[in-house]
Amino acid sequence: MKYLLILLLLSSIVNTIPNDLMSDFLTVYKDVVELSRLGIDVDGLVSKLSLALDLIVEDSPESISRAELIIDEVRAEVGRLKSEVNYYVIYRSLHKYLVVAVLALIPVGIYYLLPRVYLIIWFRLRRRWVVRYGRT
């Protein structure tokens, strides 16, 4: 939903900003969307891009230069996240498969261990009992 709002705002101001700034913004935006599709938390980057877009809409020289700084900052962060994305995807997949394996082993463990635990507890509770042969 955030991405749709950014695109709507972007389409309304395309003709008023410099082309190089717009192309930088669009490439950074595409990279952020790609990272989001891979499952990385990009909320902070989206808020920074939203701030940059608001500054671009103001269309003053100070706000344009500040928007360029924010876009460069987001580009650097995207580069760092792209270098770490493989580790994140592997970690997420490993975590998912380990959770499934543990959940699959719970019934097997209960099937084999529950009768043994029950017998051990039963024998310990009744070890002092005396059994007499014959009539009492």
Image (tube, rainbow, N blue to C red):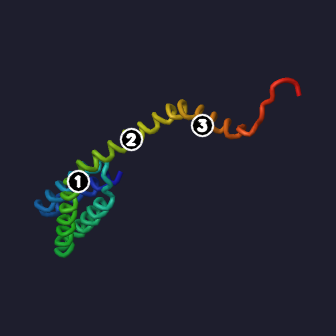
Label 2 and label 3: CA atoms lie apart by: 26 Å
Q: Earlier in the sequence, mark 2 or mark 3?
A: 2
Which of these two is toward me, 15 or 87?
87
Secondary structure at numbered mark 3: helix
Q: Residue at x 17, y 63 (%)?
A: 16
Secondary structure at numbered mark 1: helix
Q: Residues within 10 Å of mark 1 (few under 14, many from 20)?
A: few
Q: Residue at x 24, y 65 (%)?
A: 52
Looking at the picture, does residue 103 appear above or below residue 9? above
Q: Which residue is mark 2?
A: 98
Residue 45 locus on image (x, y percent): 28, 60
Question: What quarter of the picture does the C terminus occupy?
Answer: top right
Q: Residues within 10 Å of mark 3 (few under 14, many from 20)?
A: few
Residue 31 locus on image (x, y percent): 21, 52
Residue 37 at least partly seen: no
Which of these two is toward me, 26 or 60?
26
**From the viewer's perspective, is 62 left or right of 118?**
left
Residue 77 at least partly seen: yes
Circles 2 and 3: CB distance less than 8 Å? no
Label 1 and label 2: CA atoms lie apart by: 21 Å
Q: Quadrant of residue 121?
A: top right
